[in-house]
Structures are given as C-alpha cells and as structure tokens.
Image: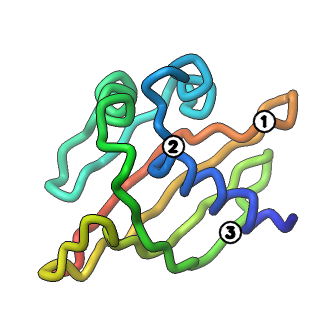
Amino acid sequence: MSLQEILFSLEQSLLHTDWSDQQEKLELMLAEEFSEINPAGSVISRADVIQWLLQKNPEHRWEFTPGEVIELGNQSVLLTYHARQAVPENSGSKGSRHISLWHSNTQGDWQMRFHQSTRIQ
C-alpha cells in the first residue's frame, strides 16, 4: 500500500467507522495536540471532534477525491483532498476541500495532528 493509500484509508475510516464502542482506538488516531478549523473558521478542540465522531450517524458516507500528499520530513505528511457527503445526498452542496497533517510516531502508527475543512461555495 502506498503512503497516499494508507492516509486516505485513515481519513475514510475516521468518517465511515462507527466509533461508538471504540473510543480508545479513535483517541489513538488523533494526537493529543490535535485541533481542527471548521468551515466557519472556528477552532475545534480534540475533545469536541472526538465527541462528534462518537455521536455521528454511522450510516452517513462521503465521497473522497484524492489531492496531494506532501512529505514534510520528520515523519510528517500534509494530505489534501475533496470530500462530499454522498449518503444522505446533499444535492445543494459542492463539498469541501480538506487538509490534514499526519505524523508517524515512533511505533510507526499514524496520528492526525491538524485538520481544516473549507466549504466550496
């Protein structure tokens, strides 16, 4: 599996997995210093993102269009992509652009450190 495939698989698993009984595993995917900037420009805490992922509808699905994978050194990678909610379909939405910063820890496990989503108008 290529680095791009690994990271897109992780991104998809964050949104497509029912985390309601896997909180510990979810917490391992998001670094302690994780934060997010949502489409409204607000900074969202790690705790708030974890709660959203635990409570989201597990039947919702998103379509992903890969963008770039940029290796930054020191086991850090910047990932860009486009996502659009497919189930339930939101026909009025053009989706959003996403950027994530992933870091591989000393055990070789990938953790997300930062994420930003920008709605396409």
The dot on residue 70 is 3
Q: x, y (%) of residue 92? A: 12, 81
Front-lying residue, 29 or 61? 61
Q: Outermost residue toward the front? A: 59
Q: x, y (%) of residue 51? A: 32, 26
CA gap between label 2 and label 3 equals 26 Å
Identify the amino acid type marked 1. Answer: Asp
Left or right, residue 7 beside residue 55: right
Front-lying residue, 71 or 59? 59
In the figure, 65 relative to 109: above or below? below
Q: Which residue is mark 1?
A: 109
Q: Which quadrant of the figure contains the C terminus?
A: bottom left
Q: Which dot, 2 or 1, sits closer to the camera?
A: 2
Q: Which dot, 2 or 3, sits closer to the camera?
A: 2
Residue 57 lies in what quarter of the image?
top left
Disc 3 crowd rating (10 Å Cα; few below 14, some 14-19, many 20+) is few
Q: Which quadrant of the figure contains the N terminus?
A: bottom right
Identify the amino acid type marked 3. Answer: Ile
CA gap between label 1 and label 3 equals 18 Å
Q: Which residue is mark 2?
A: 17
